Image: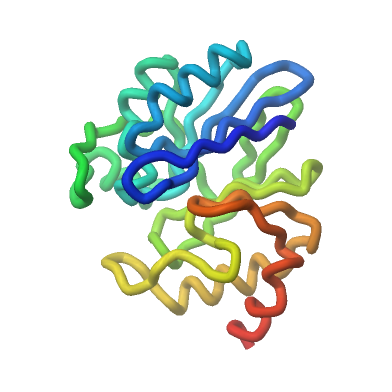
Amino acid sequence: MRVQTFACGPIATNAFLVIDDATNEAVIFDAPPESLDVLTNAVRDENAQVKLLVITHHHWDHIGDGAVLAEALNVPVAAHPASVPYLEHPTGGPVAIAPMTVDRLLNEGDLVEIGSLTFQVLHTPGHAPGEITLYAAEQSAMFGGDTLFPNGYGRTDIPGASEDETLATLRRLLDLPDDVTVYPGHGLPTTIGAERRWMERLTR
């Protein structure tokens, strides 16, 4: 599995291009503002066959280029059902966002298969009601948007967010092995093990 990270837009939101080594099939996680060119160039340079654009949650900084990217690459968009109304009628944020059609609904327990890669869908609300994390157990990797950062998590003082749901999500993530690499929506990757101590303290 090859992971390319692109920090884009006004608040450096991460988009991820994840490529299966065996088949060169790929998935993209999130499409921040100003990500269209860098992502399409990377797809071309890698000769990757993008099969799906996954939106981890509906906030403007994760979806700004979603519609144009899906059109440019001719790929379906996948998201949790709770995100659909916000993607179809995006509001808020400092940039104009085109509406997105969600072609595939991702619910708790669903599997996303990209070449030889298999991602399990975890519904991880708290920062946003439709937030999802895609967990690749065999590769010990998770892509969860703003679910978990190094030393923190997505804000819960915004509309639709919930501190109680965030704590429940963090408790659930503690069940993952320490060596799981966390690819966050902002900042550098971390691991479950590196974050375990504060997560356990917070969720007692």
Query: Does 168 appear above or below 24?
Result: below
Pick the quarter of the image with the N terminus. top right
Q: Relative to 70, say whether 144 is above or below.
A: below
Q: Is residue 77 left or right of residue 88?
A: right
**Count of all numbered marks drawn on residues in the image:** 0
- Give the percent coordinates (x, y) of residue 49: 59, 15
In the rendering, at what x and y percent does residue 199 appear?
Answer: 64, 76
Quarter of the figure with residue 73: top left
Q: Nearer the viewer, residue 145 or 112?
A: 145
* Res 109 seen here: no
Please indicate whether residue 195 sits to the left or right of residue 87 in the image. Answer: right
Q: Residue 12 at x, y = what percent? A: 42, 47
Q: Is residue 83 above or below residue 124?
A: above
Q: What's the colour scheme?
A: rainbow
Residue drawn at 46 percent across, 35 percent down: 78
Locate residue 68: give its quadrant: top left
Q: Residue at x 58, y 13 (%)?
A: 45
User: Residue at (41%, 39%) from the top-left corner?
Assistant: 8
In this view, which residue lies farthest toward the bottom? Answer: 204
Can the viewer see residue 56? yes
Question: Split into 4 quadrants, where in the image is the C terminus?
Answer: bottom right
Give left or right: position of 84 versus 191: left
Residue 71 place in picture, x, y as percent = 35, 18
Q: Is residue 67 above or below residue 16?
A: above
